[in-house]
Image: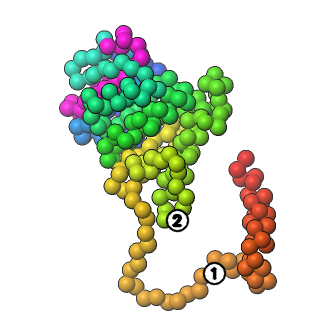
Amino acid sequence: MSELLNLFKDSENFSSKHFKYFDVYEGLLRKFRNKDITFVEIGVQNGGSLEVWKKYFSKKSRIIGIDLNPQCKKFQKDNVEIYIGSQSDQSFWKSFFDKVGPVDIVLDDGGHTNIQQIMTTINCIPNINNDGMLIVEDVHASYLKTFNNPSNHSFINFAKKEIDDINSTFPGLPKMEFSLNKYVYSLEFFESIVAFKIDQKKCVENYIIKNEGKFHNIKDFRHNEKSALLLVLLRYKFIRYFIEKFNELKLMKYFK
């Protein structure tokens, strides 16, 4: 049983989490245990989760909770701070980061609507320190009718778009009109959780490097499964187009 799960079960205040989250948390957050960090959790409610994070991270770590309900201010004590505001409100986030400064980890366990999760993502990511992360949980909401999903503009589709955004840093590829790729170095997807890894130092344009080893002039055989006639035909763009479309049809079943 994970240490986080034990802390959760022993918490004085009530909280509820999905069981499989704890192994994910341990894997993502273990490296921060002995560091003095600023940790932000959206969604305070009964205060049980904040109690867990206070015990899990170092004593000098700054633990911050955000909630819409002013009653949650009752959990502000010792090194736990409580801010009241809406995670879908851009002006709240500006005011929050003006007061708090950059943070290391943001865990979104708030309202789970598309607008809340996406506005949290785009407002928090530029304010997270290098080697920090944003963890958005309960993203199964992107598939539930009670959250007006599935939708082309669901949070999970936004997160999938960030895969394209990261890859668009490769030289020559088209760039996104809205981009977070100067902050987000990588993403991890789990059941109901998406983690955005932040490191601006690593978000640079890629390039080829070569060593000084012996060059053997070996022919590139990446197309060697094609017949000689087909290789000749591939020189004609319209034939290449139809061949690629045919290949797409063969691949479609793997995307269902």
Residue ID at (31%, 32%): 97
**Residue 201's x, y, as percent?**
33, 55
Distance between mark 2 and mark 1 Cα atoms: 24 Å
Would you place residue 54 above or below residue 216 in this image? Answer: above
**Which percent across, then down, holds residue 120?**
44, 32
Residue carrying label 1:
221
Residue at image coords 49%, 39%: 194
Residue closer to the observer: 175 or 38: 175
Horizontally, is 115 left or right of 123 in the view?
Answer: right
Question: Which disc number belongs to residue 160?
Answer: none
Colour pattern of the rendering: rainbow
Locate residue 252: give its quadrant. bottom right
Q: Is residue 213 magenta?
A: no
Q: Residues within 10 Å of mark 2 (few under 14, many from 20)?
A: few
Are the two marked residues, 2 and 1, in contact with CB atoms closer than 8 angstroms? no
Q: Quadrant of the N terminus?
A: top left
Q: Quadrant of residue 55?
A: top left
Q: In percent of the image, x 39 and y 59: which residue is there?
A: 204
Based on the picture, tell me whether residue 57 belongs to the magenta stretch.
yes
Please tell me how crowded label 1 is: few (under 14), some (14-19), or many (20+) other residues with Cα within 10 Å.
few
List x then y, in percent, for residue 166.
Answer: 49, 53
Secondary structure type for disc 1? loop
Looking at the image, residue 214 sits to the left or right of residue 164; the answer is left
Amino acid identity at mark 1: Phe
Q: Nearer the viewer, mark 2 or mark 1?
A: 2
Look at the numbered disc 2 and give the secondary structure of its residue.
loop
Write the residue at 36% across / 50% down. 199
Amino acid identity at mark 2:
Gly
- Magenta region: 50-73
Reply above or below: 27 against 58.
below
Q: Earlier in the sequence, mark 2 or mark 1?
A: 2
